[in-house]
Image: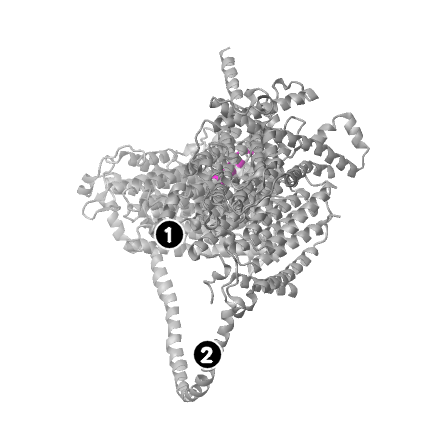
């Protein structure tokens, strides 16, 4: 029962958040809606027994990425920046502002609908395994990270190193 | 009843709005938000399939790495956006057309 | 005893990491790079020593091995039955080999800090050395032919770089290319052999190959009418021929002496050339299955004898050692051919030790003889002489090694070489076809004793022939990087380290059991034991003692029946007596010729002037390859093709076409003006302009537009499937 | 298995018997009610602690400055915070004209939700924990990071330069100091082998000899890093740059008035309590009572709660003490302290702890000393 | 199953309490507090001066760089948590060494990145500040 409640709350947050990200004009508000959406995703992870991933979602996304996003928004003029269409209709018909939404929606819907139709074909063996899931996921993830998945674990540090150095180099204020 | 398809439907909507943001919004940072949505939709799928199909937690680990990659991607993407703003004083995506033929 | 990846992998990875690090820092921090190289190889030595200790003095028997694998790639899903497991395979043989390679390499690294110190590319030398050592160790630890091949080629590359180390000299560059190309001939065959084995067995792992041989998988198959096993064995053996400088691909090794002396010691004497023999030993069951034994023994014997004869008249100290290397390698290959598996491997080890020592000693001599007129070091023996007093430690080292290589009792060379000769004699008594092998083997032993002592006498004894050079030579002091490595190696030229008996044979034994570790533990891979074999996982899984962990006991009869053993022993005793006599006779001859001057070598050379010229030209092998193979055949082929091109094709086809063309031209001109220019060209321009508009629109540079296109295409694609 | 207050109560027979007769849905409902009661109690207690925090702050500062401090409302002025609360709720709620109303409205939620959610995993005693998640401390970090977002939004939405600066500073300070804190926590997790806060407390003993702060040199340094980090994370002096009144008026909450301001203040004071109790759990033995007096009985639980609060209040006192003793840092010094001192030292500590675990098998330094002492003494005999 | 999920009830409850407290207080306050907005009252308080321009425009990249390093470390700690949690178990069965090496490699790679940033002055608040001031003046 509580599971259902949690699921409903989280899914509402996800639906509301993700749609509002797409539909809000103000970029700062979009960030906040993204935050809601990510919180909802964390809730969904909880309902799927993935407590550690949910907490990671909270720590990294809620505490990290969204803050970085709002910082970057501030550094690029904040909400004062109003997006308007520069090309207009004449040059490339597809890039109009309202039309963009329509075309975007249609193409995205088509694409995703078909992709998910493919996904839904993978039906076999998809009964929920109630009670079989190990509840202490963090230990299992830890064991996997140091045995089977040790290479991705180490490589992710290299990825982070690259991101850090690269981003710091790009964003660094320069002379002259 | 909550089953796999509920989660798939949710991730569907998330993916959809992510793609719409990517296609329709003009702000580079907003597009990065869209990418986050898309990545999270993928994450939901991974976890849901892990929960509903097999008992080993590889999906969790995959999602963990998705989060890692998302963080790295956001860091670099935002840095590029900021640099772009410093050079061009705008972050309108239609100004980033240096590669125009 | 648990072996994990952590205790095995560092052996290869330490030098490799040293190489990677040094490659970056060598320009700035040369001394640090050198230190890193030396300490990394010493670290590998410690790891190897641990493994050696476990395998030889632990509780393991001859058949014991550790095998750790991980799947490198597996394309069996595509239908090709090809799965390559990379991994480590350690048995007693590779444990011994590891210890030898790391130990010798460590000492050579140390010596190089002395020898190469004033060189302008001091650091880079160590970079190559590190890479080379790691490749050699990787080869020793490999569990399959493919990774053997990879490391094999890596060593080929290092050898190329080191031979051409002084690339300013023209000869060095040529020699490096020669070495590279010559070994390449063998390598092509080797690769061919690997492919053949894979096509039949579906795997290139040693274990799988043993399994297949024990299951008689190779029988009855043919390639172009030849039995498949023979073709595969011959091809793999060609790899050995190339790498270990056997006839007819031996020509590169003497030229390899263009490299710095320590690299000659490491590569062209102690380790790399041994890799070929090592491969043949690993593939021994295949050679047996392919009935290659006679051929191998003949090739080995001819190499051993031929190279020894050439060495008789060389005047360059390094050249003598180079030919003696070829000769000794010939012994090892001959040992494989006559079934002396154990002795052949033992000779590999003993030879590596004393040959490394000999080269280092030669390096020490060369380094101390500095010609002030030409500002170069002197390698010519006629300008040496009487160096005994000046270089006492080098003299001791070189003397011991010479005794060893000449086969004087109590020294390691005697123990191993004598066993090979004993087995050759035994085979000759059994099959008459082996008689020439035995004769050539004993002959080579005589010549070896002679030319090695000739070298010793010319270098260290008598009066100095170049007074000025001799006076400039400084008196040698004991120093940690000049003499100590030599003396350490010298200690290991004693026979007692390898064998418990004085004579190397079952008579005159002073101790058995643990002193006979070599004979007890190194034995032919018994393919029958690999029938139901499974591998351990690299990480995680436990090392499974695959066959047994009980210590083997020394069996004097080597598993043979009493009567057979008697025959074998008989032959061996005979061989031992012969070889002792022959060795002393050779030394005596050298003594007569170069100390007593009772025999004048010049006269003999004059008497056999034809032979001597043949020897000077190394039996015209280089001439043959250069004059006949390259000039006569390949150049002729080239000329023929050129003639086809210039004479036939040009004259008739081209000129004829020209005629036709001139007629065509008139027509074409008309056609061109009207159709091409006015319609096609202008029309194309117009159409390009038209497309341009479309393409410019498409190529908008706007990411979002691209994104929509991507989505559309993906959608279409998914709908289509 | 995850312990909650409900599973603790089920030890008592009448509770478990009552549960046995319920349908699953009803059981959940009853659990929700039980949780609700206890959560309500805890929220109120913590709110009161937060309120008393303001009182304590004023009183202690007065003490240090030889003043009297609040002394009118109630005995010794102890009801001052209630009076303040009433005053706050009576104040006019002004909203700046140019502000971003949506964000202005939502910012206090972030702060308060983030802080209150952390209360769920605080182990007040062995049994009295709302819920002992097995990702406890990680969850706590994740939820607490929402506060930074709230601070930033509060500053941003006001559209005032002071608020904006304060918000930016606050957010960057909070996120920066989260790193040394997290890494210090990692070293404790390393020693405990669990993320659950109750396990961490239970791995220590009631006497200081068994506390993690005295476990090895690295944790000893780690405690101070953690403590400095939490001072900065809660915007306490000497790290109160986001609300530096001499530079930024009042920082990120300049434009907030009335109740909205009260929420920020409440969140801040409750957060100080939460992090102080976290420090006590991680390093100072948490709820453990010497000799485990009282055991698992009600008395024992009460003793444990008392110990817990005692340690937390002690740290709370130190926090206030520090505020009135040390001057404020400059913003560049703030960043230097975090990135060039605390973070490298914390990383070093983590590695050191790992080595300690590896070489000494997780024994504390006192145990090792005693063992060597015993061995030496045995050698003489 | 449902029992397992009960552990999350307090989390949701506490979050709900926080929201209810705020909304409740604001609603209750609406009935008792005064409401007399004036033009001046509703401007942003900038020490008595009338605010000039929007506050949402001027900011320095250094904030972003701090956020950047933070997020890298955040992700790093998120990955470290499970590894560190199992370290004790693995150490007790003798696999502590290999995990230790893994942790060391992981940290060493990251620390090298931070060392790079340190060397390049990204961690210096003042230096980057001077740079930007220099920029502005040059322009």
Question: Is there one chain holding both mark 2 and mark 1?
Answer: yes
Whether residue E124 appears in this view of the structure is: no
Residue under the point 72% across and 30% down: D7
Which secondary structure is most common in the magenta stretch?
helix
Near mark 2 (Cα within 10 A), the count class, few <14, some 14-19 or many ≥20, is: few
Name which of mark 2 and mark 1 comes first in the sequence: 1
Distance from the alpha carbon under mark 2 to that under mark 1: 55 Å
Q: Residue C227 carries which label?
A: none
Q: In this view, does A166 lie to the left or right of E78?
A: left
Is E101 a magenta residue? Answer: yes
Is D174 a magenta residue? Answer: no
Mark 1 belongs to chain:
C
Residue C717 placed where, x, y %?
A: 62, 64
Whether residue C267 appears in this view of the structure is: yes
Q: For numbered disc 1, what is the local secondary structure?
A: helix
Q: For numbered disc 2, what is the local secondary structure?
A: helix
Near mark 1 (Cα within 10 A), the count class, few <14, some 14-19 or many ≥20, is: many
Residue under the point 21% across and 47% down: C375
For label 2, the residue is C685
Q: What stretch is highlighted in magenta?
A: E95-107
- From the viewer's perspective, is the residue at label 2 or at label 1 nearer? 2
* C412 lies above or below C277: above
For label 1, the residue is C160
Residue placed most toward the observer, A64 or C561: A64
Mark 2 belongs to chain:
C
The quarter holding residue C357 reads top left
Q: Are marks 2 and 1 in contact (CB under 8 Å)?
A: no
Q: Quadrant of the N terminus of chain D?
A: top right
């Amino acid at each position: 029962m509580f599971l259902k409640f949690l699921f409903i709350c989280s899914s509402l947050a996800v639906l509301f958040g993700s749609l509002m990200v797409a539909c809000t004009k103000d970029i700062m508000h979009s960030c906040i809606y993204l935050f809601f959406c990510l919180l909802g995703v964390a809730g969904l992870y909880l309902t799927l027994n993935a407590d550690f991933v949910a907490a990671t979602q909270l720590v990294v996304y809620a505490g990290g990425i969204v803050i970085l996003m709002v910082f970057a928004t501030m550094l690029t003029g904040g909400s004062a920046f109003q997006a308007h269409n520069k090309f207009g209709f004449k040059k490339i018909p597809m890039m109009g502002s309202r039309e963009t939404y329509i075309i975007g929606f249609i193409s995205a819907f088509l694409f995703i609908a078909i992709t998910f139709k493919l996904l839904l074909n993978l039906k076999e063996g998809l009964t929920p395994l109630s009670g079989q899931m190990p509840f202490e996921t963090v230990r299992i993830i830890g064991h996997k990270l140091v045995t089977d998945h040790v290479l991705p674990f180490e490589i992710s540090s290299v990825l982070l190193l690259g991101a850090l150095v690269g981003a710091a180099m790009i964003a660094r204020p320069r002379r002259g | 009843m909550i089953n796999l398809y509920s989660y798939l439907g949710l991730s569907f909507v998330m993916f959809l709005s992510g793609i719409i943001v990517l296609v329709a919004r003009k702000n580079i940072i907003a597009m990065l938000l869209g990418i986050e949505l898309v990545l999270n939709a993928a994450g939901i799928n991974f976890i849901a399939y892990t929960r509903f199909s097999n008992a080993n937690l590889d999906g969790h680990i995959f999602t963990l790495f998705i989060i890692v990659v998302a963080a790295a991607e956001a860091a670099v993407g935002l840095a590029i956006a900021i640099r772009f703003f410093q050079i061009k004083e705008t972050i309108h995506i239609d100004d980033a057309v240096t590669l125009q033929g | 005893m648990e072996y994990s990846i952590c205790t095995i992998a560092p052996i290869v990875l330490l030098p490799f990491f040293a190489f990677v690090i040094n490659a970056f820092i060598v320009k700035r921090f040369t001394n640090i790079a050198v230190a890193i190289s030396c300490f990394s190889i010493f670290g590998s030595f410690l790891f190897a020593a641990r493994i050696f200790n476990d395998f030889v003095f632990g509780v393991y028997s001859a058949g014991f091995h550790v095998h750790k694998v991980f799947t490198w790639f597996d394309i069996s899903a595509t239908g090709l039955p090809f799965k390559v497991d990379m991994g480590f395979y350690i048995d007693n043989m590779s444990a011994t080999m590891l210890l030898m390679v790391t130990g010798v390499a460590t000492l050579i690294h140390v010596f190089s800090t002395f020898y190469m110190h004033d060189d302008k590319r001091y650091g880079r030398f160590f970079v190559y050395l590190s890479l080379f050592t790691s490749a050699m160790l990787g080869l020793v630890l490999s569990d399959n032919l493919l990774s053997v091949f990879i490391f094999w080629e890596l060593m080929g590359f290092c050898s190329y770089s080191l031979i051409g180390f002084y690339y300013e000299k023209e000869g060095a560059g040529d020699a490096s290319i020669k070495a590279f190309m010559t070994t390449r001939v063998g390598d092509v065959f080797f690769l061919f052999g690997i492919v053949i084995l894979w096509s039949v067995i579906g795997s290139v792992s040693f274990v799988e190959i043993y399994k297949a041989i024990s299951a008689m998988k190779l029988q009855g198959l043919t390639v172009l009418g030849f039995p498949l096993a023979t073709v595969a064995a011959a091809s793999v053996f060609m790899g050995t021929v190339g790498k270990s400088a056997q006839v007819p691909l031996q020509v590169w090794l003497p030229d390899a002496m263009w490299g710095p002396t320590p690299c000659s010691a490491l590569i062209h004497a102690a380790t790399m050339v041994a890799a070929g023999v090592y491969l043949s030993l690993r593939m021994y069951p295949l050679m047996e299955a392919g009935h290659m034994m006679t051929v191998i023994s003949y090739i080995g014997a001819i190499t051993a004898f031929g190279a020894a004869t050439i060495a008789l008249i060389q005047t360059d100290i390094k050249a003598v050692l180079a030919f003696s290397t070829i000769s000794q390698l010939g012994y090892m290959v001959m040992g494989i051919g006559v079934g002396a598996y154990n002795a052949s491997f033992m000779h590999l080890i003993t030879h590596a030790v004393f040959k490394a020592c000999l080269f280092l000693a030669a390096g020490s001599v060369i380094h101390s003889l500095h010609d002030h007129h030409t500002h170069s070091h002197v390698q010519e023996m006629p300008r040496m002489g009487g160096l005994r007093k000046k270089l006492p430690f080098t003299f001791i080292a070189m003397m011991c090694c010479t005794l060893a290589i000449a086969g004087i009792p109590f020294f390691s060379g005697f123990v191993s070489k004598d066993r090979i000769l004993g087995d050759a004699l035994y085979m000759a008594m059994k099959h008459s076809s082996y008689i020439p092998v035995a004769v050539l083997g004993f002959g080579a032993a005589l010549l070896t004793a002679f030319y090695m002592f000739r070298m010793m006498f010319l270098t260290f004894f008598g009066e100095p022939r170049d007074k000025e050079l001799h006076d400039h030579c400084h008196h040698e002091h004991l120093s940690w990087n000049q003499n100590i490595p030599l003396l350490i190696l010298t200690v290991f030229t004693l026979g007692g380290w390898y064998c418990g008996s004085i004579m190397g044979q079952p008579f005159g034994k002073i101790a058995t059991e643990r002193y006979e570790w070599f004979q007890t533990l190194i034995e032919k891979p018994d393919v029958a034991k690999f029938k139901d074999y499974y591998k351990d996982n690299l990480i995680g899984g436990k090392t499974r003692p695959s066959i047994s962990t009980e210590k083997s006991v020394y069996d004097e009869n080597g598993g043979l029946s009493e009567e057979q053993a008697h025959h074998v022993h008989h032959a061996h005793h005979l061989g031992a007596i012969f070889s002792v006599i022959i060795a002393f006779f050779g030394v005596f001859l050298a003594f007569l010729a170069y100390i007593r001057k009772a025999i004048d070598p010049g006269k003999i050379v004059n008497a056999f002037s034809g032979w001597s010229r043949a020897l000077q030209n190394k039996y015209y092998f280089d001439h043959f390859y250069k004059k006949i193979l390259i000039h006569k055949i390949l150049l002729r082929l080239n000329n023929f093709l050129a003639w086809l091109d210039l004479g036939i094709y040009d004259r008739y086809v081209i000129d004829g076409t020209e005629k036709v063309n001139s007629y065509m031209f008139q027509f074409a001109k008309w056609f061109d003006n009207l159709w091409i220019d006015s319609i096609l060209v202008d029309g194309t321009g117009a159409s390009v302009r038209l497309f341009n508009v479309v393409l410019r629109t498409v190529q908008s540079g706007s990411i979002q537009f691209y994104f929509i296109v991507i989505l559309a295409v993906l959608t279409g694609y998914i709908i289509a499937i | 298995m995850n312990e909650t207050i409900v599973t603790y109560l089920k030890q008592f027979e009448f509770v478990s018997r009552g549960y046995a007769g319920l349908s699953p849905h009803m059981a959940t409902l009853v659990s929700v009610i039980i949780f609700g009661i206890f959560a309500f109690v805890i929220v109120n207690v913590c709110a009161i602690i937060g309120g008393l925090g303001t009182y304590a702050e004023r009183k202690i500062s007065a003490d240090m400055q030889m003043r009297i401090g609040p002394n009118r409302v109630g005995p010794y002025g102890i009801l001052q915070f209630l009076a303040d609360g009433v005053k706050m709720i009576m104040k006019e709620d002004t909203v700046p004209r140019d502000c971003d109303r949506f964000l202005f409205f939502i910012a206090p939620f972030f702060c308060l939700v983030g802080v209150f959610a952390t209360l769920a995993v605080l182990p007040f005693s062995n049994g009295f924990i709302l819920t002992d998640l097995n990702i406890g401390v990680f969850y706590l970090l994740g939820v607490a990071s929402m506060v930074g977002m709230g601070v930033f939004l509060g500053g941003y939405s006001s559209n005032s330069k002071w608020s904006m600066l304060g918000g930016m500073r606050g957010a960057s300070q909070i996120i920066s100091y989260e790193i040394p804190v997290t890494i210090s926590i990692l070293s404790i997790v390393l020693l405990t082998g669990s993320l659950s806060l109750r396990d961490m407390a239970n791995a220590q003993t009631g006497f200081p000899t068994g506390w993690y702060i005295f476990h090895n040199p690295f944790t000893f340094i780690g405690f101070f890093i953690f403590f400095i980090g939490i001072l900065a994370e809660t915007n306490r002096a000497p790290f109160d740059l986001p609300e530096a009144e001499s530079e930024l008026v009042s920082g990120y909450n300049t434009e907030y008035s009335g109740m909205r301001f009260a929420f920020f203040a409440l969140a801040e004071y409750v957060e100080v309590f939460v992090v102080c109790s976290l420090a006590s759990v991680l390093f100072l033995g948490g709820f453990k009572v010497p000799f485990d007096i009282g055991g698992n009985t009600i008395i024992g639980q009460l003793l444990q709660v008392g110990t817990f609060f005692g340690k937390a209040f002690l740290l709370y006192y130190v926090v206030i003490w520090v505020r009135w003793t040390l001057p404020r840092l400059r913003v560049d010094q703030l960043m230097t302290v975090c990135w060039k001192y605390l973070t490298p030292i914390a990383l070093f500590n983590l590695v050191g702890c790992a080595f300690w675990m590896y070489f000494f098998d997780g024994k504390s330094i006192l145990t090792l000393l005693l063992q060597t002492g015993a061995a030496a003494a045995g050698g003489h005999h | 199953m449902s029992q397992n999920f009960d552990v999350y009830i307090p989390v949701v409850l506490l979050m709900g309490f926080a929201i209810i407290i705020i909304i409740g207080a604001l609603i209750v306050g609406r009935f008792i507090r005064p409401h007399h907005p004036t033009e001046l009252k509703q401007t942003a308080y900038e020490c008595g001066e009338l605010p000039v321009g929007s506050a949402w425009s001027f900011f320095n990249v250094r904030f972003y760089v701090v956020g950047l390093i933070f997020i890298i470390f955040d992700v790093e700690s998120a990955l470290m948590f499970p590894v560190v949690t199992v370290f004790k178990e693995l150490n007790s069965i003798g696999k502590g060494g290999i995990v230790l090496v893994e942790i060391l490699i992981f940290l060493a790679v990251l620390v090298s990145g931070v060392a790079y940033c340190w060397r390049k002055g990204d961690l210096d608040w003042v230096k980057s500040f001077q740079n930007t001031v220099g920029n502005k003046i040059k322009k």
